[in-house]
Every structure is written in structure tokens, then in C-alpha cells.
Amino acid sequence: MKNADIVSRLEEIVGPEHVLSSDMDRTLYGYDASLEKGQADAVVLPGSTEEVSRVVSLAFQEKIPIIGRGSGTNLSGGTIPVQGGIVVHFSRMNRVLEVDIPNRTVTVEPGVITLDLQNQMLEQGFVYAPDPASQKVSTLGGNFGENSGGPHCLKYGVTTNHVLGAEMVLYDGTVVWVGGSSQDNPGYDLTGLLVGSEGTLGLMTKVILRLLRAPEAVKTMLAVYDTIEDASNTVSAIIAEGIVPATLEMMDHVVMKAVEESIHAGYPLDAAAVLIIELDGMSDGMDRQAEKIMEICNRHHVRDVHTAKDAEERARLWAGRKGAFGAITRLKKPSYMVCDGTVPRTKLPEVLSRVMEIGEKYGLLIGNVFHAGDGNLHPLILFDERDGAELEKVRKASSEILKICAEVGGTISGEHGIGVEKLKEMPFVFSEGDLDAMRNVKLAMDPDNIYNPGKVVPEPRQE
Ligand SMILES: Cc1cc2nc3c(=O)[nH]c(=O)nc-3n(C[C@H](O)[C@H](O)[C@H](O)COP(=O)(O)OP(=O)(O)OC[C@H]3O[C@@H](n4cnc5c(N)ncnc54)[C@H](O)[C@@H]3O)c2cc1C
């Protein structure tokens, strides 16, 4: 990229104060929450769809990569400029455009912070359900890009289940709408294709989201176990019984220790694992359901199970869960890698014990905190990034964990996407033919490979 010329053309589009091109800025935008690093050629902060469209059109003419960016909290290298290019940072496009309560929709720009929208909707008695643990900082654009999940997605589904339509800027700068606020849309389901496409097929500039009525009642329980196996078996048994709680989260003793050192959520330090089980909905019948769950917990040797006595205790339990990734660095090592594999719930005990064996094999400490109800594991591998040999072991361990997930009938990502970090694991779950179908979609939507190149789909295998 001919930097000076492109930077001045970008400045003409968005104004000089909204283009960053110093060495420091370009390096800063070369990071996200993954272990990967790159360097942007320039960073642009557009204020409108029209500006995004003009930036993309310029990139298309000049054949420069475009990388969309929300808060950069993705865990798979999705915002790393692996081939340089222009990072489009959506922090200025952060308005809630229309709240349509009778039709239960809200239209927002991509830079709105997830929790800000949720708090604003709750004041009116409604919820936007997908709740990634990073919701305090993640954006709705990033949630769209990654098809993010969260604890409550067990009952309510992930981001794609809550996106009705979106305004998209295509590879050459053309602006189109996919989906819409009506319940059914004819034609190809492009909304479904674009949610979770990690910025490789287009940039979303507006999105229509589904709102749900806030539940009348909520009950949050903490179940304490002496073995991970008993906790895991409880998870499968609850679902097998036909009960779908709002959340079924698990945390092991390694993670609880880190959380208690920083957040003091009230988890027992001598237990092997806890489950956070939350029920929500009508208050009628909820006590009966809670009793049933307690009975199942007892059947699986729970040491203690109790309901949060008030909103404050509930908030503390959740603060511990949502702060777990951040807290983990208290445990001697400054860096961690989050694996994100999904397995059938019934395989949880087997897979968790194989994960621990991998930790022992490589001499790495691994903690687990995850969406157990979805079978979505998040082994956190602790290490020191400055130690190259240890980093290499972490990458091997992570890949082996994902291989196990695939072998038992699961997959290599539950919600954190593929980005660059998991490209080499894609063949664990897709044949070369499957990957070719994806390559053809990319070719149709982005023929010159402008959008986020080097992500999601690996290069064809060399025979
Ligand atoms: C502590 C911590 C906890 C987390 N917990 C969870 C969790 O519980 N569940 C979960 O699913 N994830 C979780 N994550 C991962 C991450 O927060 C999510 O992937 C989140 O959705 C990313 O949002 P972001 O705004 O940071 O997006 P970014 O990281 O900036 O971008 C994510 C992807 O979306 C693309 N993108 C950004 N904006 C647009 C746009 N406007 N149009 C098209 N594509 C776009 C980017 O190119 C990139 O590929 C966690 C991360 C951390 C650090």
C-alpha cells in the first residue's frame, strides 16, 4: 500500500482526525485478545454507512485488505491485519437508531457496546439475550462477526437467532440490506450467511435485533461438587429430564481459586467444580422446577446446592463467572490461551479428563470455565508468552484438545470463531470438498479477497 497517498484519500473521506497512521497506532491495531499479532497500514474511524462505503470502494480499487473491528476482544485473531491493510474501527458508529417495542425490535449501529444496549432495553422491560462474558466491552458488530454466545444462549440461542436483518457494505462499496424486520424473508438467507462470517464477506453498518420480554422471575443456584464427573453428569441429567435452564455454567477449582483471589464471588475453594444453574420465566412453577433440579443434583452426589438469597448474591456469582478469564492471570502465569471446542454433553466427563491429561503431558496448568449446558468447553491454558518453547507447547496442546472435541462428535469452535488461530484445525471437521464450498462462497461475495484475507477458511491443500 502506498501509505501517504492512501492516508490522504482516507482523510478526505472521514476527516483527518479520524485516520490513524503513526507507527504506534498501526502496531496497537495489530493486536486483539488472541495470541496473534500483525500490523495495520492505516486505521480509519468512519461515522456513517456512506463513509464506510467510500472507504471500502477505495480499498477495492487499490486492492487493499479491509479489516472490520469492534473492541478487538475476539479470541481467534479475527481482527489481526495478517496482510496489512486498512482497519475500519466502528467506535464512532455507536448509536441506537430505533427502538420498536410493539414489534420487539431494535436497530443499532455496529459500535454499540453489548451491555449498554442490554441495560437500555432492560429499563423498558426487554432483553437482548446473547450475553458474552465480554459484554461490558464487546460491540454488537463484533458479536455479529463472531456469532457470539454466552451463558444465556443455552435457552435463548446465539447471536444469529436474534438478528433479523442487517445493512451490509459489499466488497466494492455497494450498500445492501439482508433480511429485515418482518418475521419471514424470501430469497436466500444471506443474514444467516453473514452472521459469524468474521468480517470476511462484508461489513455490517446497521443491524435489526430481536427483543424479548424480560423474565418475570429469576432463580440462580450454586451447586458444589467434589468431582468434575459428578458435576458433568448433572448437566446431562438436567437436560435429559426435559428441563432447559437459562444457564448451566461450570467452573473448576483452578478457575475458582483465581476468581476468589480477585473478585470474592463466594465460591468454595476446596471443591472440584461448581455449576451456576439459573432458571428464568414465569414465577408460577419455578419453585417446582428448582426442586426437581436439586433432586437431580443430589442424585449426582452434590455436596451443597443453594439458591442465591438476593440480587446482590446473584450479581456476585455472575461477576465471578464473567470475570473468570481476566482473573486467571492471578495464577502465576501472565498469559492464557482460551480453547473453544464443543462436545456432546454426555462426553463432558471423558473429554475433561483427557484435557487434564494433555495438561500433564505438556506440563501446563489448565483451568476450565465453560457453558456446560451447550457442551461448549473453554480450557484456559496458562503460560508465559515470553517463553517461546512454552508457547509452542500451548499451541500443540490446544490443537490436541480440539482434535479430541472433533473425534467425540463435537467441533472446533462453539462461539469464538476460527480467525487465524484455528485455520489448521478446520480439516478436523471439514473435508476438502466442504472447504471448497466455503471458498466458493467467499469468491462469490468477495472476488478480490479484500475482506479480512487469511481468515476462517484455510488455503487449499497442496497435493
Ligand atoms: C474476557 C473475555 C470473555 C469473552 N467471553 C465470551 C463469551 O462468553 N462468548 C463469546 O461468544 N465470546 C466471548 N469472548 C470473545 C469476544 O468478546 C467476542 O467474540 C465478541 O463478540 C467480540 O466483539 P468485539 O467488539 O470485540 O469484536 P472484534 O474482536 O473487534 O471483532 C470480531 C470479529 O467481527 C468482525 N467485525 C467487527 N465488526 C464488524 C462489522 N461491523 N461487520 C462485520 N464484521 C465485523 C471482525 O473483523 C472480527 O472478525 C470473550 C472475550 C474475552 C476477552
Image: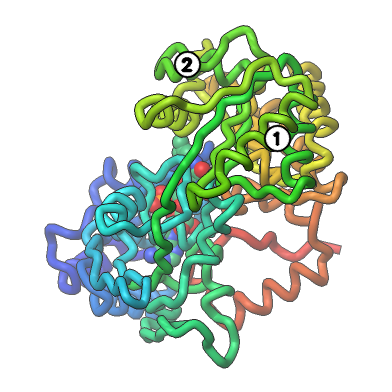
For this view, does 425 lie left or right of residue 78?
A: right
Estimate the spatial distance between the alpha carbons at disc 1 and disc 2, rounded to whole Å: 30 Å
Query: For mark 1, what is the residue?
Result: 398
| Residue annotated with mark 2 | 266
Residue at image point 50% right, 37% down: 219
- Return the x and y of residue 366 as percentages of the image width and height: 66, 22
Residue drawn at 43 percent across, 74 percent down: 63
Would you say residue 37 is visible in this rendering?
A: no
Q: Position of residue 369 (x, y in %)?
A: 60, 30
Inspect the image, locate mark 1, and give the three-letter code of the amino acid beneath it.
Ser
Q: Is residue 429 visible?
A: yes
Q: Where, by quadrant of the figure, is residue 44 drawn?
A: bottom left
Q: Earlier in the sequence, mark 1 or mark 2?
A: 2
Q: Local crowd at mark 2 within 10 Å, few (<14), some, or many (≥20)?
A: some
Quadrant of image for the N terminus? bottom left
Q: Name the residue nearer the viewer: 151 or 387.
A: 151
